[in-house]
Amino acid sequence: MERIKKLQIVLITVILIFCLVSCANDGETNKDGNNHTPLITDKNYKLIEEIQLYDIHNPVNGAKSYNENIVFWYEEFSSGIKVVKLSPDGNVVQTVSIKMPDGFMQILELFITDTGEYEIIATVNKFNGTVAIIKGIYSQTGDEITTQILVNDISHFNNTTIDRALFTDDGNIALLIWNDEYSNILFLFNNYGELLGQFILNPNQCIVRLKDGRLAVSYMDGNISTLRIIDFSISSYGETLHLTVSNINRLFPTDDSQLYDLLVDDGNFLIGYILETGEQVRLINWMDAGFIKSEDWIIGFLFNDNIFLLNTMPLLNEGYLTWSSTLYLFSYTSDSDSTDAEQKVIITLGGIWFSDEIRREIINFNNENHEYKIEIRDYLDSGSMDAWIAGELRLYTDMITGRGPDIIIDTGHNLINHNYLVDLYSFIDDDSKLKRTDFFHSILQSLETPEGKLPLITNAFMIQTMLATNENAYKLDPLTFANLLQLLNEFDSLYLAGDYMSRELLIENAIFASDNSFINWDTKNAFIDTDAFINVLEIASRLPEKEDGIIYFDYSNISRLLSGRQLLHQYILMNPEEFHNLQAIAQGAIVSVGMPTLSGGQELVIPREGIGINIGSPHQEAAWSFIRRFLLPEGELNIGFPIRIDKYEELIDVLMTPNLWLEDVPEFGIVAGEERPREIILDGETINIYAMTVKEAAALREIIDMASIRVRSDRAVWAIVQEDIHAYFNGIRDAANTARIMQSRVQIYFDEQK
């Protein structure tokens, strides 16, 4: 939220800036000062072989090519390293075991010299409370040749978790050390272990060693992803290397034998980048290759310009943790570019987050459709909040300037009130296999505009509510802010609304999740200067400053509700089975009371992801042919309540069907034909879960049918609210003045947007 004020830029200014950035990207200037038009080409490497490495049961640390072989290595407990050479067809050529010095902790990097010797950088525990960085050279058969200490003690750098080691062009060593959840630190040492400089990175930045030995990191320059050279002499950024990719998920080095200076994974493509010309070559389309998204690959080139990927994944096998490693080989031939895909019409699907179901369905659509092909346009550069905000702004700007994607994935529903999306009812009503009554009316209603149009639809949803005991639910009926404040005045407990409910969260819910109680989001009118909002501020003042818990199932909150030590618990119902389990645990003593609003408690709909069609798309029919796949009975659904009533009823039928014992087991009192309950364990107590009752099924259906409000989102409004409530909580203003000032500021903001 720190940079939230950027979202308050006047729309014309946003568009101008966007256009200037776009123009700048149309004529990049490279490091030699010459202007180059970025050339983006496709080479279309094809997956030719997938090889399972059955004998590898440890996580692979790294891999590279050497003399037409693939060399990878992994740690063997705390004793040493195993190096494996594979031929391109996956056969083991050589296995070398390298015994490391006592106290060996972690391999940071492995190099192979021109003569085939192994040069290894690793950490060792010196058993006196210090951790050292060593460099060892070993023969082709694993015998030690020399070992030297590069850095005698790194423990005084506060953390000994080292991500990797990189050698710079002058032979110094750079160590990337994980510092905390907010930053990493890159330390530069010479061969004598002397600290030459350091550089702070955020955890979302990628780092790579270029072929010339310089170190470069990914960097967000406004809304544009770039590479910046690290200049240790000033502990800051040096030269900027512009990319035209929107995202940088990972960076991979290349060696001197390769045309490309580095490889860039933007989440959808593996791209080869040439610094001198700015040329970018899309080598692998992850979805065309059958992968739902880019993975944590180890990537390298083989002879004849082939590419290998090595992936290692944890597996639980009969209770034991093991690892599965797979080698993927890609090849490029002259006819690789002459594919059916090039003859297809490209339609784009854009957003800032894509579920695995969306990605899998894109693969299926592209394989089955002979006329159209979907490509993802990813607006999220990294997982940081700043990047999320920037991604939303870029998507919004593309939509209003007519350059938006054909299909929009809108997890935040920030476009729902704008006229940039097609009314999906027009497609549903004309579809021979779909009709409005297939879906929960309340959920569709929550997604509608005031005019009754449906700009977005989802195939799954969750429900946010408050839980209370039957006794307190009766006292809170209706669940208005005034009634809640009155009951809080009578409730003597440290736990009012649970660990998760903080001051800010309660106010955020009141503003964005109370069905236009304080802001009419459709007309953009604020009603904050009211007694009801003053009640909200007074309630918030009694809650913790920060949350300390989780919004999903937490038995401590349920236990406190049942024992009368907690009044309410905010909760997200994820699926029918979770509701069923909750009823069994509470033995029917806890009910859903909804979220507080001016008129009483109402359940909040949380669509898993909204999907819509750009009103300016020339391919609306093709876009709908993709969206409808999620809405048909056979559509994939992994998380949430189905929006289709028939699919929901199928889940309920399963929960209502008893699981019966098939045989008598006299010693345990088991009789064939009796119900066999499921068991869950909470706080060491075994709880039996029997089949869902008719009463429970009716209660859940009533919750869904009554759920018709949705969460709204406006970061600029939230920034205003945060500033004003901090003044209230710090005693600078009273509740009445806080509400009055907030009303004025929010309404001024809305008036400027009209």
Image (cartoon, rainbow, N blue to C red):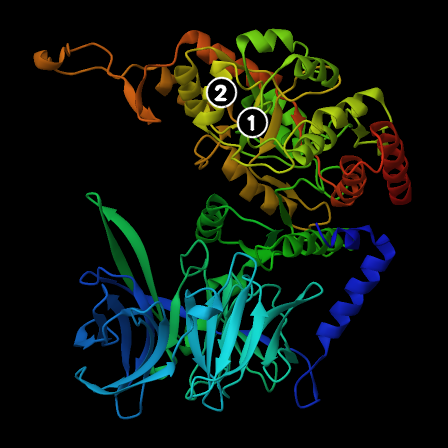
Label 1: element kind: loop
Relative depth, front residue between 556 and 44: 556
Q: Give the labeled residue for mark 2.
A: 560
Q: Residues within 10 Å of mark 2 (few under 14, many from 20)?
A: some
Which residue is located at x 31 percent, y 60 percent? 312
Q: Is residue 365 left or right of residue 689?
A: right
Q: Give the labeled residue for mark 1.
A: 498
Which residue is located at x 33 percent, y 75 percent? 122
Which residue is located at x 47 percent, y 10 percent? 589
- The answer to whether residue 527 of the structure is visible from this angle is no
Which residue is located at x 23 percent, y 75 percent? 100
Q: Position of residue 146 (x, y in %)?
A: 25, 88
Q: Position of residue 501 (x, y in %)?
A: 61, 30
Q: Residues within 10 Å of mark 1 (few under 14, many from 20)?
A: many
Q: Is residue 293 left or right of residue 238?
A: left
Residue 690 vertical placement versus 68 (above, below): above
Q: Position of residue 557 (x, y in %)?
A: 49, 25
Q: Is residue 207 left or right of residue 658?
A: right
Which quarter of the rendered picture does the C terminus lie within? Answer: top right
Q: Position of residue 274 (x, y in %)?
A: 55, 82
Residue 698 vertical placement versus 41 (above, below): above
Which amino acid does the dot numbered 1 rest on?
Gly
Residue 489: give its label: none
| Badge 2 vs badge 1, beta-carbon distance below 8 Å | yes
**Disc 2 to disc 1, how far (Cα)?**
9 Å
